[in-house]
Amino acid sequence: MSDDKHVKTEPPRMLFVDEYSNFLGGLNDTLKEELRKVSGVPNATYLVNDGKVFVFDKLVHLVKERQKEQPHAQLQEMARSLTVEELALSLIAEATVSAKEAVEAWGVVPVPYQTETLAAMDTATLESRATGRLILHRPFNARMPGDFQEEGDVKAAFANLLVGGVLPGSGDFTYRGQPMTLRDPLDLALLPARPEIPEGPAAEGWVYTALGNVEFEAGFEPVSEVMFNAVKETEAKWRGDIAHAAKHAQERAAEVWAQAAGLRLETLNDPTDEVPEYGEEEFPQLRALYPELSMLSDGTLYSLFDVFQMECHFINGWAANRDDDFLFYLLGKVADRKNDHDTAKEVGEWVADALLHGATLDAALEIGRSADRYNQAIGKLAHRIADAMRFLAEDKKATDLRGRTITTMGDTFRIGRKYNATAMVVEQKLPF
């Protein structure tokens, strides 16, 4: 007889499959990782040699096909199967094709170009329709000369660029003999007016700037070294000032809460907002935590806090808590209802800083709005210049024409496990 007390039971096992599972296996990642290690196989999506193009994806395809054929051939000829390395090296020549085939059959796009479709509204059907295509140099945010009406026109141009050719036409500047035209100008003078954010001390090391770790590289005609330094200095000063303003607002948050009744927060009320049935038990605690927000209806308070948690803290299924950032988020919404995520919180901090410096509410709200406009503009300018400088730094090292190195989803997971990895135990209560 068995004793029920000594029956050994195993814990239930579960398999969680998230959206990343779609990428695993189906993209030949294991084979790609093997092939890129083989000495003699270029670790690049493509490599140009004497006007011909080695295509890594074609090599993957050929190796897979040969691997399928090998077991049958082994039975017929009593021959051993070739290793992946032997197969790869024997197929490199076959994986090397014309530029035309590389682009048309294997989807190769020469680095650093991309396309953009131009569209217009058809007045008869009120639907958007393609009217042409642009070829763009992504790091320079510039377009190539040429009129590309059909996809075939783009592919022909790509095949030319792939092997180092130049597209004919004119432009604002040239790079390696290729004329091109900036899509948007690069000029500090075109920035909107800088708002009156009180100057803070020198920027701390933790303040992020797009150009902080970027050095000037010659070769991009629209950006001289003088301009580069001016933008870098302007961005650093601005980032330091707004970081100081945000810190000031956070340190004196209690004073801003004390002014809540006069901050027009009631304009955020939406009569369609309701406390959902699943939130009714939690809501009394939420209301008790924010006595200063009595001007907000129950539904609006719940809705705004719920969205704030998801947008700023990425929490869905929160517990009620007191958070000063919620007030700044609401202030950012008062300044402009379109503000969301961290933008709303940041604008709210700048509004609060202005209030704490004695500005009227109207003036403070305008400072918040203008600070957001300026912040986006200087950020875009700095990022564009940083992209161009990083490209130049890499491009000057190039000794051949090749694509990007081969990467896999496995690489992404390995990087994730390498930095700041921690163990977490999660218990999930299932409804069955």
Image: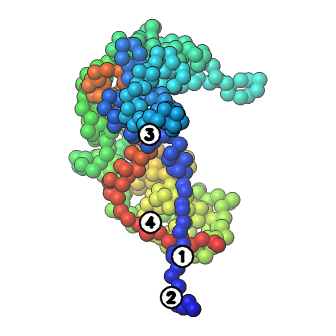
> x, y percentage for residue 166?
41, 11
Q: Which residue is mark 1?
A: 285
Is residue 272 visible in the rendered structure shown here? Answer: yes
Q: Nearer the viewer, residue 189 or 55?
A: 55
Residue 78, image x, y percentages: 47, 35
| Residue at numbered disc 3 | 31
Please report the residue visible at 69 percent of the width from the left and 59 percent of the height from the top. 272
Q: Please name whichever residue, 296 or 112, is drawn nearer the observer in this view of the structure.
A: 112
- The three-letter code of the residue at mark 2 reads His
Relative to 25, is 183 above or below? above
| SS class, disc 4 | loop
Residue 67 in sight here: no
Q: Residues within 10 Å of mark 2 (few under 14, many from 20)?
A: few
Report how far apart the C-alphas of labels 3 and 4 lie in the structure.
Answer: 49 Å
Which mark is nearer the camera, 1 or 3?
A: 3
- The spot of residue 93 in percent (x, y) is 41, 21
Q: Which residue is mark 4?
A: 323
Q: Is residue 23 left or right of residue 352?
A: right
Q: Estimate the x, y position of residue 326 in percent, counting from the top left.
A: 47, 61
Q: Earlier in the sequence, mark 3 or mark 4?
A: 3
* Residue of label 2: 6
Question: What amino acid type is highlighted by mark number 3?
Answer: Leu
**Going 39% across and 45% down the picture, which residue do you hit?**
411
